[in-house]
Structure formats: C-alpha cells, structure tokens
Image: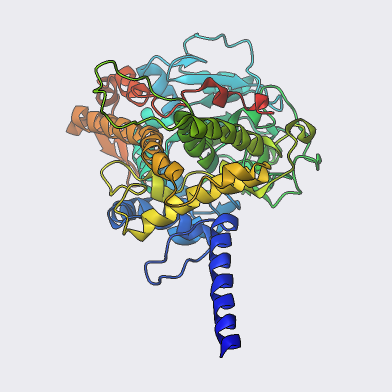
Amino acid sequence: KAIDRLARHFAAALLAGLACYSWQAEPFVWPSPASSEHVASLADRLSAESPAAEESAAAACDAVRPLLGGLSCRSFLSDHWEVAPLLSRPGAAWARALFSLRDVERMARLWPLRFLRNHGTAVVHTPGSGFLADPRWERGAAVPPDIVEVALAAERTFVLHNLEVYSPPVAAFTRSVVAFFHAYTQVNLYVSPAGLEVATSPHQDAHSVFIVQARGCKRWSVHPPARGNWTLRSLQRGKAGEVLSPSDGSLMQPPSIEATLTPGDVLYVPRAFFHATATADAATGDSCGGADAGDPSAALTISVLSEDVFATWLYLLGEALDELATPPPNPPTAPPTAPPTAPPAELRGAAARLVSALRRLAVAQLGIEQSHTGLSASRVGDQLREALPRALMAPEGTPPILLAAGSDPRALLWRRHALGLLRSAAEEAGQPRLASLWWDGSPAAALLWPVLDEVLRRKRVPGSLKLEQLDTFLREAARGRSPAGAADTADGGVEWGDEALRRIDIDAVFKIEKRDKAHLPRDRAWFRPAEWT
C-alpha cells in the first residue's frame, strides 16, 4: 500500500510538472468551443474569440472567402495564416468588380495625388532595383491623369498606395478584411509593363499580403525564409536598393510556390516570406491565356499589418515592462496615506533587464550577428515576433480579455501564456532569477496585468481607426451619389459617378487614421532593432 501511495504521488507530481512545462514550451491555445481540451493549433489561437467578437466577424468571413482558395476561414487560419502561401482562383469577374485600371485616371483627376507625399502616395519604381524610385518623378509633383501610360512607356512600375480610401469597391472589401483579421489593412496598386525578366527582385515584407491580379499576368516565386519565422520591419531584406539573388540559400529556401497569376487569381504571401516577380511571359502570352498577350500587369496588394503597427507579442510585453520599469511621477496633491501605485525598485530593475533580453532574443536570428547578441536562434524569438492573435485584437466594445473575471478560463489562459513567454525569455537569456518573478498570482504578475491591458488597448487603435475611416468614406460616397451619378456595370457592380466622389473631403477622410498614434511605442529604442545587441 505504501508503494502504491508513493507511486500515485509521483504520478501526480509528474503530471503537474508536465502541465507547468507545457505553459512554457508550447504555444498557448484557447479551449475548443466543443471541448475543454487545449488543442495546440494556430487555428485555436487565432480564431477562438469571445462570442460577441466571433459573431461580428462571421459576415466578414463570408466576404473574404475569395482570398482563401475555397478553404473555410478556420482552415485558412490553421494551415496558412502567417505560415504557408496559398494560391486561389476565385475568377476574373470578381476581380473586375473590385478594380479597373481606368480608375487610376479618374482618381488623378478627382484628387490631389502626389509623388512620395501625402496620402495619395504614388511612386514610379525602376524594375529589379530593390524598390528604388525613378528620380524623373520628383517628390511632391502632381500625378498626371495619364501616369499609367507614361510609366509603361518608360518600362517602369507605377505604384499607388492606400487605394482603399479612393475606390468605394476596394474600400468595402478592405473593411471586411479589417473586420475579419482585426488588423489595420492597406491596399496598394502595382502596374508593370509586359516583358520584364525581373519586375521585382526577391524581397520580404513585415506583413502578410494577398495579391489580387486584376489585369494581365505576372509570374511569382515565393520562398520560405531560411532562418527565423517572421521579421522586424526595419530588418526586412530586399528593399531600399538591396538587390538579392533567389539562389541565396543563407536568406531563403527554394520556392514553395511558382505560379503565373492571371486576372482573378489571388496569391497569399505570409509575413517575411521572400517573393520575386516577372512579366516576361506576358509579352508573348505564354502561360497567360493568349488573350492577355502584351497587356500590362495590374495587381492589388492587400496588406494585413501587425509588425508595421507594433502589434506583436514582443511589443505588447516589452512596452508593458517598459512602463513597469519607469515609475510614474508622484502627483503633488496625492494624499500621504494613498497606497503605492509604482512597483518597487527591485521589480523596476528586473523589468528593465527583461526588456533588454526580449529585444536581443527577437533579433538573434534575423541578420544581426549572433556573436554580438550572445544568443543563438531561438523558438522564443519566433514567439515574440508572432502577431497578436485575432482574439486579443478584437475591437473595443467586446468583452475584455486580459482583465476578464478571474473565473473566465480564457482570461486565465492568456495570462499564463504571457507569463510563460516572459519566463522562457528570461531563462533563455540566462537570467533564472528574472524567470522566478513571473508566475500566476505573484506580486509582479499582479502589477503587470493592468499595464498589459492598457498597452493592448492602444494596440487596437489602428484597426479601429481604419474601420472608422472606411465607414466614413463609404458613407460620404453613398450620400453624395445621385441616382444619375451611378450606373450598373455589366458584371453587376456599381459605377460611381465623378461628382459623387468629388464631393468627398478626401484629406479629412485620410487623416482619420492618423488621429491617434497611441499604438506607437513611447521608448524610441523600439524603432531601432539594429541596436538591440
């Protein structure tokens, strides 16, 4: 009997130890709605939200299905979001209803589009140059209505940013993307001439991108990165004049997708995956269906931002620790008996040291010399660079997550995941004393929760403002449109009249998303990852 009791105690201790270890070593997941089991899948981390938030995203899920290759929204989140590219073919009619190349001329006539300035940021790129702007189009110069023809004649690529605040169909679709992913989203237009052996050399983005081919065709190759999942914006490769080779095995793996997009095709490129393009096939119609031979390539890039707007675990945890490390000023009118609100000096010092550890782990495998950081490639670094899940980024008005009632299992699990990341980071950085501070119920954790929740609130700001901006633009477009100002198109869409759009104060609409910059880190060191060594 004694041996039996001892065995049972040992088994219980082992299970408890394994449970504790799992919070540190495995990604956090929410319980499945149909089961209490914790399934270690990206789908559960990204799609399981509070019922109110999930219900509000259902219509958006239906709207974005053309991007998902016939998959359910949950399957896309599980198998592809931020981890694997995907080719979809929803059809040319859908793409035509979304955008037409002739819309560029109308936009240039209606609104003050400028090169490299203001919201109507336009640029003419030299193909294969690492995204260098052609100096013939000066900063601040007005974009002429015939810019597409002029750029194509010069064998250059024309790019127009923020198409979602100039085109009602694009705005309406972008709103669904924002509502589904709970993330700031921007749409750019790329127009390239046919016959380019290299339209863009290999490069990576710090955000996930859906490419919608609207006209012509373009050849794409997509390469997984050779080291480190995801990247940081200022460390992304293949831009600012850096021309990379697709055979550089130190940066990228062999292509996982090589495909020619034709009108109506959609390609999903996860964050940090390298990609390169060419339009050589379009000159003869090879692989382009013949009818598109010689047509320029026009494609929309729907960018879903996370790192660009500082919405990853690295910034959520790091900025919260920053605020713990910096005590607030004591108001002179505070009563002498008021309870202390600032963390003790020992905890402030520990928080500051942990911030440094988080930064070093985040860059240890992204091109910063490991001999400088003293750290090797780490799984913790990948987890820190991971985008904040949809469940945390749901807009204001849905039930709070981090500070929900203590009996809410979702709140407890998210708290444990945050603490597990902090403990793992401290241990991997060789600072076990720091790791011992961050346990559920510890004084350090109790001080962290309200700060973490406030930083999270700020991280939701860009997505909320983007929704407000798009709603304002669509409302003003509908208000100014008279029955004679719009006509049904052959594909069932709506042709918006110039007068309806001209009445919109486009400057005021664009400034909505710039109204609140609370999501930006307060410590400028967060903007300089190259110095995190």
Callout count: 0
Query: Residue at the spot x=42%, y=36% of the render?
Result: 184
Q: At 31% from the left edge and 23% from the top edge, which residue is drawn?
A: 509
353 or 167, nearer to the observer: 353
Image coordinates for residue 5, horizontal then vertical, percent: 55, 84
Query: Which quadrant of the view contains residue 249?
Result: top right
Query: Relative to 342, is 115 on the left or the right?
Result: right
160 in relation to 454, above or below: above
| 266, above or below 533, in the image | below
- In what quadrant of the picture does the N terminus appear? bottom right
Q: Where in the figure is residue 400, as x and y percent of width and height?
A: 31, 47
Q: Nearer the viewer, residue 196 or 476?
A: 476
Residue 55 percent across, percent down from the top left: 29, 56
Q: Quadrant of the C terminus?
A: top right
At x 49%, y 56%, the residue is 77
> Relative to residue 76, is residue 140 depicted above or below?
above
Would residue 410 be visible to someone looking at this image? yes
Residues 483 and 291: in front is: 483
Q: Position of residue 187 (x, y in %)?
A: 46, 34
Please identify the residue farthest to the bottom as the structure is shown. Answer: 1
- For residue 87, side relative to residue 97 (left or right): right
Instruction: Report whether 98 appears left or right of 124.
Output: left
Q: Is residue 38 above or below residue 10?
A: above
